Amino acid sequence: LQYLGRAKEAVAVAKSLVRNPRHPKYNDPAAKSDDGKEGSSAHGRRRLIEALATFELWDEAIALAGTPYLEPGETFAERIQRLRLLGVAYFRTGNPEKGREQILALEKALGETRTARYAAADEAEEKAKKEKKPAADIAKAMADAMQKVGERNGSVEKALAELRGWDALAKKDLVAAKKQFANAGDANRGRLARAWLAVGDTEKAVQTARNEVGPNETRVDRLAMLVEVLH
């Protein structure tokens, strides 16, 4: 439905998945099944965030933030996705103060991940020493532990870059906005293309949009985004 550009239906289906009973074994939002598949509730939440962002349904995103459909989430990744979505929604609807609240929350999350990295390294070191492993293995165990936890940093830093870009744009600081958007990484491509348009970089906007649209593209949402950027 999202691919066909049917925004209302895409949101409705995603919300229906979120409403499914959360069975502790078969539909736990914070866990995956033995074959690595997420439950319908988690899948619905992810699709809901995608649909709200793709179709820029910012007012609806803000309204859903106070409901079970878009609650803070069970996992770290869900928390970050929600903060990023809400931050963009507030900035795009002319409420930079609330947008900055999401930035502060992301900055706090980033501090937590950095603290967790060192804690993970200490734990890995202690465990390796108890097992009487050689120094090289101890060092590797510490590095592996830090890397595993550190992977969270990337998602938070990219979310912060995007929100700081919209914040700079709200302050009419186009130079700072460009710098931040360049580090936004995995931001929604349609949204990022529009961001480049907003800072006056039409060439970058078109390039970003074209990179999202393949040579045999059939997704209506992507094609519509490209048409919007080109015109």
Image: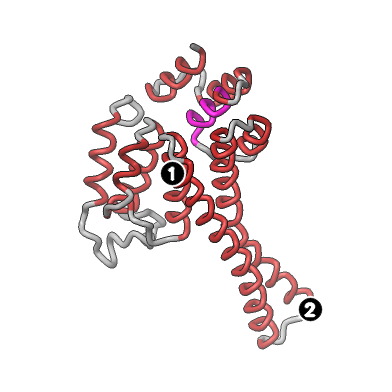
The residue drawn where x is 54% and y is 46% is: 159
Task: State the residue lying farthest toward the top.
Answer: 231
Disc 1 and disc 2 in contact, CB within 8 angstroms: no
Q: Tell me the amino acid under the disc marked 1.
A: Leu
Rendered view: 124 above or below 81? below
Q: Which mark is residue 11?
A: none
Magenta-drawn stretch contains 142: no
The residue indicated by pointer 2 is 135
Q: Position of residue 36 (x, y in %)?
A: 41, 56
The residue drawn where x is 37% and y is 36% is: 58
Of residues 135 and 227, the one drawn nearer to the viewer in this rendering: 227
The residue drawn where x is 72% and y is 70% is: 140
Quarter of the view holding residue 145: bottom right
Q: Residues within 10 Å of mark 1 (few under 14, many from 20)?
A: many
Q: Position of residue 11 (x, y in %)?
A: 28, 38
Q: Which residues are magenta?
A: 188-197
The residue indicated by pointer 1 is 85
Q: Position of residue 113 (x, y in %)?
A: 58, 63
